Structure formats: C-alpha cells, structure tokens
Amino acid sequence: MCDLCERVKKSKNYLSFMEKMFSEDASRMEFSTALVSELSSLSNLLYTSVGYPVNLIYPMFEVRAAYSVPNNYYQPIAVAGEKHSNNFGHGSTRSLFFVGSRLMVFSKTVSNKDGKEFLTSFLLAHFEKNEYSHLWEGDNITISFHGEKPVKNLVTGKTEKKELSFNFVGQNVKNRIVSQEDVATSSQFKSIYSKYGGASAKSASIDLEGYAITVPHFSPHPYLLQLHGEFGYVSNREFQEKGVLEYFRNHLK
C-alpha cells in the first residue's frame, strides 16, 4: 500500500467525509429509484459492478478538463453510448482510485426535485489490470477502457452487459497552474471562458483550490485537499503538483 493510502486509512476526518458522502448517495439512490415512474430514463443510468451500497475509504482523484469551467468540468465518460454530464455540481464527481490492484471508476451526477436530491447518473465500476489500458509518456498518463462490462442495474437489480467508454488524460501540470490573481487579469482566460457562458465565467476549480489548470489533469478529490496537511502536503498546490504523480506512479508500476 502506498504512503497516501496508509495515511488515508488512518484519517478519522477523511473517514467521516467519505461515510457522509456514501450515506447521502444512498438517500439519493433511494429517491432516484422512486422517481423512475416519472423519469423513466433513470432506469438506464444507475449501474455498479461491485456490491452496493458501499463505504470505500480510499484516496480519490477527479478527472478534470482543462480550465475546468462549470459546464465543462470533467473529462467525458459514456455508458451504452450515453455520456454522463461533464458539468460541475454539488454532490457530483468523476474519480479514479485503486483498491489493491483494481482500478475503480466512480462517476455520479446529482440533481434535485421537490427539494430532495437524486442521482441523474451513477457508475461505480472496477477493472482488473488486464481489462484497461494505461500509457505513460514522460509524466503524462492516459487511462482508458472501451468495451463491454457486466454491471448491475441499481433500479431493476438485474445484471446487464453495458458498453463503457472513457479515455482519461492526466497531463503534467508543471508550469500549467495559473493563480487566481493571474486568471482575473488574463485576456487568454477571458477568451477561453467566453466559450462557456460568457466572459464573466471562471474556472470552477478556482473557488475550490485557488488556481486553475490549463491542461486535462487528475486532481485530488476536494475531501483530500481539505485535509492536505494530514497527508504530508503544505498546500493544495503542492498536493496537486507532487502527490498526484506519486500516487499513480505507485499504483501503475
């Protein structure tokens, strides 16, 4: 087990964060299944390849788009040809992590109805080493899967074979991190953000981390960043610049 995994396992604060998240997801899932009669599309959007409900205490890393604007925050993933939303939102994530030698992919999006939250998409899938591909090019990594996977439909309870597709890219962020102050005065950023809701739009990650990243990247989940000091990093930025590469190097030897 890598050093970060060891520290996470011992962190009562991280345990509390994750238990709360999975408890909230269980409530969202219950409401989602109750809404199927009104929103029939939900019967084809909620899947897992592992037992559910779960409470997984592992470090998670979000797969984010360059600049991470609110309506183009995550890198794409598709289930049976249907893309999950790439939008930033409360309760949503698109994360990679490892359980032993298995790669885990966790993608979920959240909405609300009548003041209650529900899951508009959900995928928690595991991949053995021989199922997915990964490629290192210097300090850049690509992790991908394109094929069928048996998954349990969490509405019907039946196991189905579904086509899953993702091509997640974690580029080296060295010299690709821009401070909040630089973003505010950058004509380049204003031009980029004008494509996503107007020139006043900004990187959603600025509010979370205080900086923006100009390339597709893997980022420590916000729960990890809130506790960066427990895991040996003096700042969010140091965790991003050093910890991410170290984690994936350790698990993809």
Image: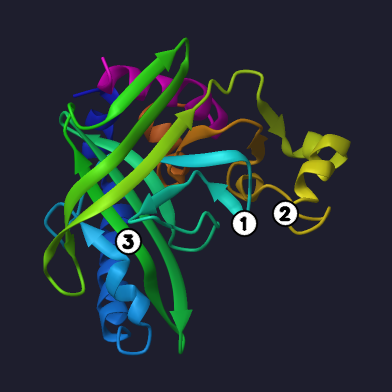
Residue at the spot 52% in from the left edge and 32% down from the top edge: 217
Q: Earlier in the sequence, mark 3 or mark 2?
A: 3
Q: From this view, report whether residue 251 is shown above or below residue 33.
A: above
Magenta range: 235-253
Determine whether 70 is above or below 221 in the image.
below
Q: Which residue is mark 1?
A: 71
Q: Nearer the viewer, residue 13 or 218?
A: 218
Q: Residue at x 37, y 75 (%)?
A: 118
Q: Which of marks 2 and 1 precedes in the sequence?
A: 1
Circle 2 crowding by C-alpha within 10 Å: few under 14, some 14–19, many from 20: some
Give the amino acid type for the residue marked by disc 2 in the picture: Tyr
Quarter-of-image position of residue 131: top left
Q: Nearer the viewer, residue 160 or 141?
A: 160
Amino acid residing under circle 1: Asn
Q: Marks 3 and 1, Cα distance to the nearest angstrom? A: 18 Å
Which disc, if any, is residue 122?
3
| Helix, strand or loop for disc 1 | loop
Apparent side of residue 38 relative to residue 162 in the rendered image (left or right): right
Q: Quadrant of the C terminus?
A: top left
Q: Are marks 3 and 1 in contact (CB under 8 Å)?
A: no
Q: Residue furthest top?
A: 138
Q: Residues within 10 Å of mark 1 (few under 14, many from 20)?
A: some
| Proximity of marks 1 and 2: CB atoms separated by less than 8 Å | yes
Q: Position of residue 8 (x, y in %)?
A: 27, 37
